[in-house]
Image (cartoon, grey):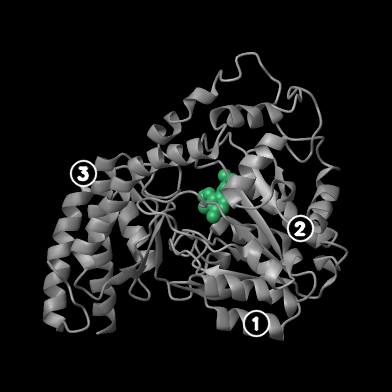
């Protein structure tokens, strides 16, 4: 049944509601228990890296002769920094390899700016109202960091080529207390968009007009997570060199969605001035990261080509799941006015925009039918989606058959919520 709401009469809407309601009640009786919430790798994906266990086989020396069992090495092992450099396409000297979580490194970087300031600039806490620009929809955990530290957040709409740069430039020019910006530049969480050259260049130019303490948090979590075709992300590093703004960007990545999500390596890359500031804060807290685990990863991927082949295996597992979600959306809404979505070529998410005002109700209906979705609003600062329309679909974790069922339920809930919303208005 194709539902076109804008041209429907009240009678048609009522008929549709009755029909959809019957289908919905039938589904509710199945007592499903399905989960489309977090972007976690499936067990099948995790298995791809199980060779990590035991790979050292008693040989704990790194290629440079470091006994990884001992203390030390805040920067991480040279071979691990080289791995991070390959992933981020930057020089090894500009990379630190840390523990298992890039989110932790981001949190420390925000703390560094907040408490001490980067590269001799004023600590953000000394400002009346420091704030970050937040492309929306975005990654909820970025927003939680700002919220926890009392750093304000300003929404900037995402477009098909990255954040709306006219808005970004205007805000940065007008407000010198904008001291940061979150970016997920490749296969953005959740829209799947990859920033184009114009966006990357204009972002690199912000450092010329922003507060000297301004930093872009370039969270390249999906740098090598292409699904079907290779998607090129223009180099932010080159753009900052061309614009003499190398201090304005700090890059992050990790192997969380490459090896074992909870036991990988995280990377941060920045100018030496920024890395010095970060290390000053971190060395009070730790003597060094888990180098044994870092070495295990270098043994698994002695060459970057092996890592890329490994990512193709991930893609083979993920591709049918993305196709399943897109097939359901296309079949149900391809010819309707019930919502819009992007077709990502990588990453972990598909973002769906319902008609305004419907997302909360879709999530509620799905939950009652046994399908858990990320709470509506979670992809916005403070959990507030001003138009109440964004739904983040995370297809990686459930097995394909479960995903297929969950998508049938989701599609039905979107239809039902949309028809009811329209009936209330009519
Ligand atoms: N950044 C983004 C954009 C993510 O989607 C995720 C995981 N969902 C993370 C960071 C978390 O990365 P890590 O496991 O390295 O902390």
Where residue 110 appears, as percent x and y from the top left, is: 73, 58
Mark 3, residues whose alpha carbon is within 10 Å: few (<14), some, or many (≥20)?
few
List the residue tagged with mark 1. 171
Instruction: Measure how far apart labels 3 and 2 are at the Cα level.
Output: 56 Å
In primary-sequence order, the first of circles 1 and 2 is 1
Q: Quadrant of residue 423?
A: bottom left
Mark pair 1, 3: CA separation: 50 Å
Q: Give the x, y percent position of residue 232.
A: 48, 59
Q: What number of labels is visible?
A: 3
* Residue position for label 2: 271
**Residue occupying image coordinates x 76% and y 58%:** 271
Is 277 left or right of 257, judged from the image as shown? right
Earlier sequence position, callout 1 versus callout 3? 3
Q: Nearer the viewer, mark 3 or mark 2?
A: 2
Residue drawn at 66 percent across, 16 percent down: 59
Query: Which residue is labeled 3 in the image?
Result: 30
Location of residue 57 with respect to 114 vertically, above or below? above
Q: Is mark 2 within 8 Å of ligand 1?
A: no
Along the viewing direction, whichever of 82 and 75 lies nearer the viewer: 82
Image quarter where the N terminus lies is bottom left
Answer with the quarter of the image where residue 63 lies: top right
Mark 1, other Cα within 10 Å: few <14 / some 14–19 / many ≥20: some
Residue at the right extreme, as displayed: 120
């Amino acid at each position: 049944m194709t539902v076109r709401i804008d041209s429907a009469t009240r009678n048609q809407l009522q008929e549709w509601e009755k029909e959809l309601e019957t289908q919905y009640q039938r589904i509710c009786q199945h007592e499903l228990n399905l989960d489309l919430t977090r972007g976690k790798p499936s067990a099948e994906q995790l298995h791809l890296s199980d060779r990590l266990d035991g790979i050292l086989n008693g040989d704990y020396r790194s290629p440079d002769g470091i006994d990884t069992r001992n203390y030390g090495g805040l920067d991480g092992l040279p071979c691990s920094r080289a791995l991070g450099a390959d992933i981020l396409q930057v020089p090894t000297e500009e990379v630190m390899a840390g523990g298992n979580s890039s989110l932790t490194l981001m949190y420390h970087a925000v703390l560094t700016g907040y408490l001490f300031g980067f590269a001799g600039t004023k600590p953000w806490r000394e400002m009346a109202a420091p704030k970050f620009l937040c492309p929306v929809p975005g990654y909820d955990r970025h927003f939680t960091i700002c919220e926890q530290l009392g750093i304000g957040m300003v929404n900037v709409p995402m477009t098909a080529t990255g954040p709306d740069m006219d808005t970004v430039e205007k805000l940065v020019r007008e407000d010198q207390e904008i001291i940061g910006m979150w970016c997920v530049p490749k296969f953005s969480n959740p829209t799947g968009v990859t920033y184009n050259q114009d966006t990357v260049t204009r972002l690199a130019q912000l450092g010329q007009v922003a507060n000297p303490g301004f930093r872009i948090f370039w969270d390249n979590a999906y740098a090598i997570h292409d699904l079907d075709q290779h998607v090129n992300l223009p180099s932010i590093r080159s753009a900052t060199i061309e614009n003499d703004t190398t201090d304005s960007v700090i890059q992050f990545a990790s192997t969380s969605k490459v090896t074992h999500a909870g036991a990988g390596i995280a990377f941060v890359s920045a100018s030496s001035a920024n890395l010095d500031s970060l290390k000053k804060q971190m060395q009070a807290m730790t003597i060094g990261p888990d180098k044994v685990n870092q070495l295990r990863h270098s043994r698994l991927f002695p060459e970057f080509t092996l890592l890329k082949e490994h990512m193709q295996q991930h893609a083979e597992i993920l591709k049918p799941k993305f196709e399943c979600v897109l097939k359901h959306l296309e079949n149900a809404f391809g010819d309707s006015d019930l919502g819009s979505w992007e077709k990502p070529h990588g990453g972990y998410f598909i973002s769906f925009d319902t008609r305004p005002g419907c997302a909360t109700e879709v999530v509620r209906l799905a939950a009652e039918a046994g399908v858990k979705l990320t709470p509506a609003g979670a992809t916005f600062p403070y959990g507030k989606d001003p138009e109440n329309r964004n739904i983040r679909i995370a297809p990686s974790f459930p097995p394909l058959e479960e995903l297929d069922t969950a998508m049938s339920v989701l599609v039905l809930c979107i239809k039902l919520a949309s028809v009811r919303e329209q009936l209330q208005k009519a």
